[in-house]
Amino acid sequence: MYIRLQEQFEVEEWWPSESAFEIMVGAILTQQTNWDNVERSLNELRGKGLLEPRRLAHANISELEETIRSCGFYRQKARSIKGMALYIQLEYGGVPELLLNKEIGSARDELLSLNGVGKETADSILLFAGKRPKFVAAVYVSRVLRRTGILDSTDYDEVQNYIESRFSDDPEDLSKLYALFVQLAKTHCRPSPRCGQCPLECDCETGLAQGKK
């Protein structure tokens, strides 16, 4: 699957950023919205010098809300990214790498303790910002695995354990695999599947069934 998807999709530089902290902020902003909206908000934050823990930790909350309004749920997200910035500033002197480089279980628990950070967001931060071997078992992934007949589960932990126990533990490989799943889900394996031209169609239970109709 990994090889076939690589032949179909280009995912180099899939999560562009200028710093680990920018990825951490982006991981919260991307919840329930698309990347174009996130990129717009990140550019606004960058223009105001707020993509740095100390500055963001002391930002005016109303101004922050307006800055990221394009992302939706901007009030909740403003509180979450400000709280995360304050935590990093107080606990790690504004150096997020000191958190991200800790023992992976401990780092994940700390991230999960922050407001607005669930499993998917924490694992995105660990994988893409921290370059740690923690796979993001998003709904896109379970959809593809279920439709191809590989794993019939929507449980986050079960899907994550399945991938991590059967695939490379290299963070670069894991990040590419996740990006490939997302690209496939956006183009073919959508909520209503578009199996024609899908690179997995010939080996996919759903794709084969669609072809018989």
Image: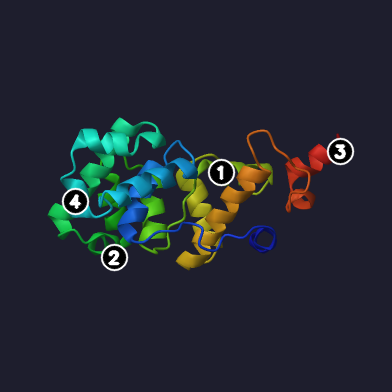
Task: Tell me the amino acid under the disc marked 3.
Answer: Lys
Q: Position of residue 99 (x, y in %)?
A: 25, 60
CA separation, marks 4 and 3? Answer: 58 Å
Which quadrant would the C terminus be assigned to in this image?
top right
Task: Tell me the amino acid under the disc marked 1.
Answer: Tyr
Q: Position of residue 88 (x, y in %)?
A: 20, 54
Which quadrant would the N terminus be assigned to in this image?
bottom right
**Label 4: which residue?**
55
**Label 3: which residue?**
212
Q: Image height check: is 70 above or below 100?
A: above
Q: Earlier in the sequence, mark 1 or mark 3?
A: 1
CA separation, marks 2 and 3? Answer: 50 Å
The crowding category of the residue bearing disc 1, from other C-alpha atoms within 10 Å (few below 14, some 14 to 19, many at least 20), is many
Q: Image height check: is 45 above or below 5?
A: above
Q: Earlier in the sequence, mark 4 or mark 3?
A: 4
Give the secondary structure at mark 2.
loop
Q: Position of residue 110 (x, y in %)?
A: 25, 51
Task: Tell me the amino acid under the disc marked 2.
Answer: Asn
CA separation, marks 2 and 4? Answer: 22 Å
At a point 73% along the width and 39% down the height, the residue shown is 194
**Label 1: which residue?**
140
> In this view of the protein, can residue 125 be seen by the observer?
yes
Q: How many marks?
A: 4
The crowding category of the residue bearing disc 2, from other C-alpha atoms within 10 Å (few below 14, some 14 to 19, many at least 20), is some
Task: Tell me the amino acid under the disc marked 4.
Answer: Arg
CA separation, marks 1 and 3? Answer: 25 Å
The crowding category of the residue bearing disc 3, from other C-alpha atoms within 10 Å (few below 14, some 14 to 19, many at least 20), is few
Which of pointers 1 and 3 indicates the residue nearer the eye? 1
**Label 2: which residue?**
101
CA separation, marks 1 and 2? Answer: 27 Å
> In this view of the protein, can residue 151 be seen by the observer?
no
Q: Image height check: is 30 above or below 69?
A: below
